[in-house]
Image (tube, coloured by chain):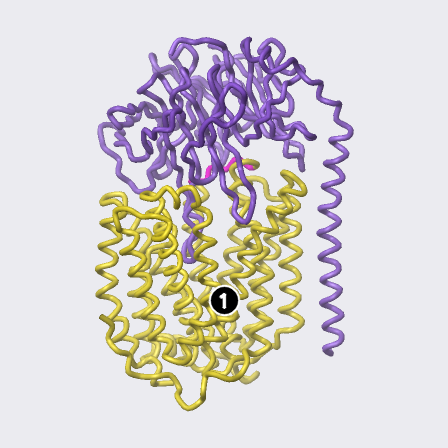
Chain colours: A purple, B yellow
Amino acid sequence: MSLRNRVAALVTVLIVAVAGAGAYVWKVRRDQARTVAAAPPVPPGADLATVRAQPHLVFRSTALGAGYGKVAVVPLTAPDGPRTLTPASCERVYATAADAICLSAERGLVTTYQARLLGPSWTTVRDLPLTGIPSRARLSRDGTLAATTTFVFGDSYANPGQFSTRTVVARVDGEVVGDIEKFTLTVDGRVVTASDKNLWGVTFLDDDRFYATAASGARTWLVEGSLSARTVTALHGDVECPSLSPDRTRVAFKKHGDLPAGKWRLAVYDLRTGAETLLAETRSVDDQVEWLDDRTVVYGLPRETAGTASSDVWRVPADGTGEPQLLIHDAWSPAVVRGEEGS
Amino acid sequence: MYVTIRDRPADGIGPTAGKVSATVLLLGTVSLLTDVSSEMVASVLPLYLTATVGLSPVAYGFLDGVYQGVSAFLRIAGGYAGDRGGQPKWVAVVGYGASAISRIAMLAATGFAAITAVVTADRLGKGLRTAPRDALIAEASDPAMLGRAFGVHRALDTIGAALGPLVAFALLWSVPGSYDSIFVVSFAFAVVGVAVLVLFVPNLRTTAPSTRTGLRRVLREVGGRRLRRPLIAAGVLGLLTVGDGFLYLALQERDDVAAVYFPLLYVGTNIAYLALAVPMGRLADRFGRARVLVAGHGALLACYLLGALPSGGPGLTLAVLLLLGVFYAATDGVLPALVSPLVPAETRGSGIAAAQTVVVLARFASSLTFGVLWAVRGPAVSLLLFAALLAVAIPVAAWLLRGAEASR
């Protein structure tokens, strides 16, 4: 081929590539804009203070439009009704009556992430230590302890993509209690020191004790930990992202079982009897579930329609009966605030 | 500390004047476009897998380690395939093509198995193309300017790697949550890269059309006297090269600055690498490639020592990033420049592949060892131990490499 023909061929490829990719992105943009335009306007809810004064749900609103990514609040009595948007934007949020923890992304040359503690007016009170891609965030019941889990990945020219988690517990006044990965992990009476040890998904029992996931090799466990003793001890196998029930007798979690890789099933483990109950939700849930009350759990699920970035919050009974029901449209990362609770 | 490397690279031909060949610039452009494409996807992949697909990152990391091994062996296959047909270009085309196709396949891949397969196809493509491409660079370059040629190629490659995340996040800003758009645009970049390769990179033949380089010939050359000592040296140094991920983790363990700006550490190293790739290549051409390669490991040794200090700060963190950039600039492109003249043109791809594979596998073994050591003894003691071993290995490697450049 002559140089002229080759240049012509390259220009053709270039035009097709630019036009093709450009058209694709343009179409996605147009579809997104249409969805926004076609979506019924989100009726604004009551003012924040009113909603916050009653038992309510806090979540990330994923309805396309101006409020996308904003934290929203709805009363427990009308979860899918009008939502009240807060000024905060978070990838993941968790809240108590006192305060909220917000994981957010700053996109740029490299994306960095922040964990911020938000006060009653939803403005930043304090930045909490955070490294990597945020995955889970929880506050203790009295709102004095915060736990964040992030994925830290050490890239390298020789062996990229090594992933590990980092889970840090801090007091909301800023004092770091510790990286629980450094706590002593005991499984069946033996201390696990493997370098692939990972811990994530904290749920607090009180000001000292907590539950979390521990993993090493291909195995995961429910662990009970103590912040003062700096120990975590395995209670039960195949448990990820536990969440303690309001009456503190059970943990809801996601279980891998013999499902295909990357799929999980929701289950509940009774801390007193050791009994495990599979829930009626059969779709794969990758979320740290939240308890609506002592009988019901709620969780986020990505919408299965192709091309949407949206997700919904669902509810299912915690005893294995019934069937999942949609709780909130266009929502993610739910937190239930039932009002004043003993700590 | 260093044993003098007596032998100098070809004196006489002044390594000062002259430009890098157009083929090297073209191959650099191909790498730039391909790296924009691959880094676009790589920078959003963790988010995509965890936020949209719901994959366990721990499982992903584990699988990734396994496939690194596969990629390393395919590198030898790629080098050999290029040598056997005497047409490394077309083997490189297959490698770049496989990675390009893997981008568009991401659109359809939703399950864990499918995504693993797609990511693997990308890695296999990378494994396949590297050695024949480096053989082409060597073939197209003045032997006295090999270090510079590889430096220019690696610098262009790094520019692509730096642009990729920018493009990806500009896109995500424009079309929120549309990972599909990222895969489509990434595919477009990769296709243009392959087109530049196919249309403009000359099909440099490394052998006469009639001869076929047999496996026995390749084995004789690769295992032969001239390559044996450099391969052992590269292996010994590789065994003491801790993945930079571990160094970053060590920095952030002691240092709040490093912890908060953790993702920026890679950028820092990349900038240093980008700035130094060409100067280091020229330095290698002038003062000896073996010498620069060995001295680069001195910079790595300094990184270990700085990383092992009980407390850090922004200055020390920056110093480590700079030294790490020096290390990559003094080794990544210099190694093929060192190895290329040691093997005849007909087996050059295999020779380069052998050296790179030895390094990759040795570094993989090193990271596994270091990970275990870290868990038992903590970062500081582990780094000091590796530093002590590297301090012994550097003069040994210098001794092993002392004849490497004389026999050219």
- Is B213 placed left or right of B231 in the picture? right
Residue matched to label 1: B154
Q: Position of residue B369 (x, y in %)?
A: 28, 52
Residue B290: name its quadrant.
bottom left
Q: Position of residue B302 (x, y in %)?
A: 29, 60
Look at the image and tell me whether residue A127 can be seen: yes
Give the position of the N terminus of chain B as an image quadrant.
bottom left
Name the residue: 63% across, 47% down: B170
Look at the image and tell me whether residue A320 can be seen: no
Q: Where A255 sits versus A20, above or below?
A: above
Classify 10 Å Cα crowding around label 1: few (below 14), some (14-19), many (20 and above): many
Q: Numbered disc 1: what chain? A: B
Q: Position of residue A64 (x, y in %)?
A: 68, 30
* Total tally of numbered discs in the picture: 1
Give the position of the C terminus of chain B as an image quadrant.
bottom left
Q: Where A124 sits versus B360, above or below?
A: above
Residue situated in front as seen by the camera: B46 or B107: B46
Secondary structure of the residue carrying tag 1 is: helix
Q: Where B167 sits versus B125, above or below?
A: above
Residue B304: name its quadrant.
bottom left
Residue situated in front as seen by the camera: A94 or A287: A94
Residue situated in front as seen by the camera: A108 or B180: A108
On whether residue B374 falls in the magenta region, the answer is no
Q: Where B330 sits versus A156, above or below?
A: below
- Is A143 placed left or right of A48 in the picture? left
Q: Position of residue A175 (x, y in %)?
A: 34, 28
Give the residue type at disc 1: Arg
Q: Which range of residues does the magenta coloring cover?
A: B53-58
- Is B234 placed left or right of A71 in the picture? left
